[in-house]
Every structure is written in structure tokens, then in C-alpha cells.
Amino acid sequence: MSKITIAIDGFSSTGKSTVAKQIANHLGYIYVDSGAMYRAVTLYAVQNAIISKEKFDKETLIKHLSRIDLTFNFNKALGYAEVYLNRVNVEHLIRTLEISGYVSKVAAISEVRHKLVAIQKQLGVNKGVVMDGRDIGTVVFPNAELKIFMIASAEKRAKRRYKELIDRGDDITYEAVLKNVTERDYIDTHREDSPLVKAEDAIELDNSDMTIEEQLDHVLGLISNTLAP
Ligand code: DC
């Protein structure tokens, strides 16, 4: 069966990566978490004192972009590819609230987007890819055969993210997570370069009241319709 491209966009913590990983495994496709790439660039900036509580040195970050090498390596045990920054696995380091606090500002820098979008397009050149993010259906793969736009209330999303962070041992409050979620929604939808918008031909999926199993069934139905309309 010929392979297609599946673009999954939506607000932060809508469960894009959960469903994207499931369907990539189901179809034997590559899964790419584009948000992880923006997070890895942010981590680089923090590790190199380009971004801190006191400063956000956009010009220096732009100058450093050529030194940032991003790759994905498949982790068999986890069943998905993890992101590597300059050959170091940073999957865990990029998911902190500190990185979440800066990442939307980094993702608003056009030079950063330009570099990452080029890598993302290359990763999908042979199709058979499920990529999630904010601009996948609009900018990275405007010709994707299936585009899904995921939404859920800010409270539901913050609850999910809070549970994830607590489960991995982080010391945070629900209020701090909710604040981060709403701030990122604002920056992601208001930035000048490729703001988060639903592609005209994307199918909206509100999973506020869906279980993970219901969501998977629903998306598999959308895929069947796309493969054999
Ligand atoms: O999906 P995430 O929360 O890991 O994404 C982190 C940030 O990166 C998010 O605030 C917006 C940005 N992002 C983006 O601008 N474009 C993408 N394709 C993916 C993520």
C-alpha cells in the first residue's frame, strides 16, 4: 500500500504525540516530534547561557544555529525516536518546565524556524511519516494526505501535563502548569512567522472527553477513509 504523510497540529498538551506515536507504530511509519526540535534548540541556548532568567539573546542564538546538530534515533524499547542534540540524547532534559517557559519565544524566531522546517521537510521526503507540531499541515507538509488539528480545553490540557510532570518526579504546581499552557497558546497563535492555525483542509479533533483508546479508534477511522475513500 502506498505511504502517506500525516500532519498533526494543535495546541500544547492536546495529546498530539500520544496519538502520533500510536499511529506511527500501527502503520510502521516514522514518528517525528517537531516540538522536541524547538525544545532542543532552547536547551542549547540555556546550556550556553544565551537564554537565562536575566536575558534572551536572540542575535547570539541565531549566530550559534550552525553549531546545533539535531538528529533522531529510534529507541526500540520505547518504540519511538528520541531527539539528540549534538549527539547527546536530550529527550528528558527538554521536557522541564524551565524549557517550556522559554521555548515559544525561541520558536517565534524566523531563523530557527527556517532551519528546523528544512530538516522536517527532509525527514518526510519519502512519506510514511507522522509528524506533530504547530505548522506541519500549513508549512512543513501543506500537501499531507491527512491533516488533524487537535484541541482540548486549557484546564484539561494543564491537568494532563501536570500529571506527566509529577509522575516523572518534578516539583511543580498545577497553577504553574496552567499558566505555562495559556502563555504558550498565546505566543504560538500570535507570532508573526507561521502562527498556529488550523489548515483549511485539516480535520478538527476535540479530545476533551475522549479516552486515549477512543481517540486512537477515531484517528484510525480517519486514516482508513484517507487510504480507501
Ligand atoms: O509540542 P511542544 O509543546 O513540545 O512544542 C514546544 C514549543 O515549540 C511550542 O510552544 C511551540 C513550538 N513549536 C512550533 O512552533 N512549531 C512546531 N512545529 C512545533 C512546536
Image (cartoon, rainbow, N blue to C red):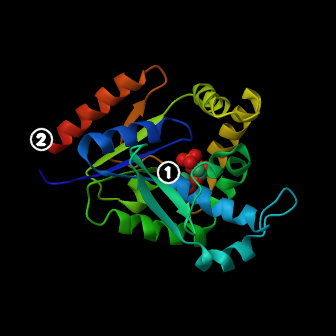
Q: Give the amino acid at mark 1.
A: Arg
Tell me, for residue 134, which label it has, or none: 1
Residue 95, position as x, y percentages in the image: 63, 46
Instruction: Compare marks 1 and 2 and give the one earlier in the sequence.
Output: 1
Residue 147 showing in the rendered view? yes
Residue 108 showing in the rendered view? no
Q: Give the amino acid at mark 2.
A: Ala
In the rendered view, does 171 fall on the left or right side of 181?
right
Q: Say which residue appears at 71% left-offset and 54% top-offset.
A: 102
Q: Residues within 10 Å of mark 2 (few under 14, many from 20)?
A: few
Q: Say which residue appears at 41% left-offset and 47% top-offset.
A: 80
* Residue at mark 1: C-beta within 8 A of ligand 1: yes
Q: Nearer the viewer, residue 195 or 87?
A: 87
Q: Write down the quadrant of residue 125 in the picture.
A: bottom left
- In the rendered view, would you say 103 is above or below 9? below
Tell me, for residue 228, which label it has, or none: 2
Judging from the image, what secondary structure is the residue with disc 1 in? Answer: loop
Q: Write down the quadrant of residue 44 in the picture.
A: bottom right
Residue 193, position as x, y percentages in the image: 57, 63
In the rendered view, does 31 fall on the left or right side of 26?
right
